[in-house]
Amino acid sequence: MRIGELGKATGVDVETIRYYEKVGLLPRPARHSNGYRSYSESHLECLAFVRHCRALDMTLAEIKCLLDFLGQPLAECGDVDRLIEQQLIRVRTRIKSLRALERQLAALRGCCATPHIAADCGILHELVTAARQEGRAGNSL
Amino acid sequence: MRIGELGKATGVDVETIRYYEKVGLLPRPARHSNGYRSYSESHLECLAFVRHCRALDMTLAEIKCLLDFLGQPLAECGDVDRLIEQQLIRVRTRIKSLRALERQLAALRGCCATPHIAADCGILHELVTAARQEGRAGNSL
DNA sequence: CAACACCCTGTAGCCGCTTCAGGGTCAAGC
DNA sequence: GCTTGACCCTGAAGCGGCTACAGGGTGTTG
């Protein structure tokens, strides 16, 4: 299987496949006599695994870690569990902050109904005021 | 006000402040005789505005656009409204996909309860199986 | 034998910072 | 006077996760 075929089969850009190889996420394939990469079924599985994990928003480093576990079936794998747990926490935190964001944006949108000039813009006005208050308040960072 | 003071007042890293200046988000400050940057109250407001918008997850380009409107109070500002609307759509889309993610991760976490070796790891098993199915299915990308 | 789709390598660009190298400035303490 | 230390300066490089480009080679079709 050449790189373009692998790309089509998995929906992954060929540049991305070469990139994964470069950073060690995808094992180096054999080469045809003309230098073209020649992929096997196992590469396809590996790439699908990587993409699935990416869809779960894992970092490439985390995925590499999971691949290592797959390569060492006898290793103890408590870390896998911890990795997923961490990921879940990250995602939940992000959802929370995005919800807050959504509320703020929805409120802003209401401020700017009819056509007008920037000086009278409710959104701009709100943004400036909010920023000013944050600026005044002590910054807990 | 020197850069360190501005940083403390706003909770922004000095390197980030210099970066904002470089990319044109923050007007260039006056300089002391020794070359140190000297910030005014208006810089503080501007920086607070930028950070507030960043907290709303806007890109630097979008923030620059808002700053331009603030600088031209007579301009018609329908674009401000559209910008917020777009932002809101982006955030809502992201929340949706993160919720799906959360469900998947929560399901995975259950697969891996007691200590065991990688070969018997429910999480790894699930990930591989799911990836395999996606690989088989047509890829709608 | 020319056009075209595909493949190769290596490098640079994207965003929004962060970090580093290699310096200069200035107030306080010995 | 001299050192220490906190602060400041510039410019360049690095991060993740790609994406895009330059400048070539290969292989099939008309």
Image (cartoon, coloured by chain):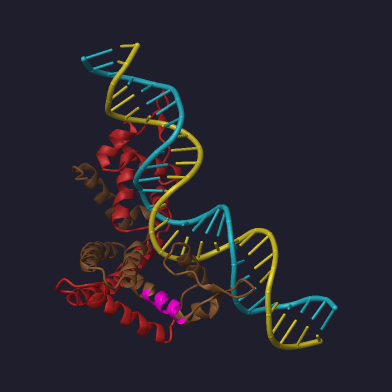
Chain colours: A red, B brown, C yellow, D cyan
Residue A55 position, x and y percent, is: 28, 55
Q: Is residue B118 visible?
A: yes
Whole-percent x and y of residue B120? Answer: 33, 55
Q: What is the x, y in percent for residue A42? A: 33, 39
Segment tinted magenta in the rendering: B41-49
Left or right for A56, reference B92 = right
What percent of the width, then of the height, locates residue B100?
21, 62
Quarter of the view holding residue A54: bottom left
Q: Residue at x 31, y 70 (%)?
A: B72
| Residue depicted at 47% across the width and 82% down the height | B9
Identify which residue is drawn at 46% across, 75% down.
Answer: B12
Judge from the rendering whether residue A34 lies leftward or rightward of residue B33; answer left or right.
left
- A110 relative to C7, above or below: below
State whether residue A117 is above or below residue B125: below
Q: Nearer the viewer, residue C26 or D23?
A: C26
Q: Nearer the viewer, residue C19 or A127?
A: A127
Q: Give yes or no for residue B64 being in the magenta stretch.
A: no
Principal secondary structure, stretch drawn in magenta: helix
Quadrant of the frame with the N terminus of chain A: top left
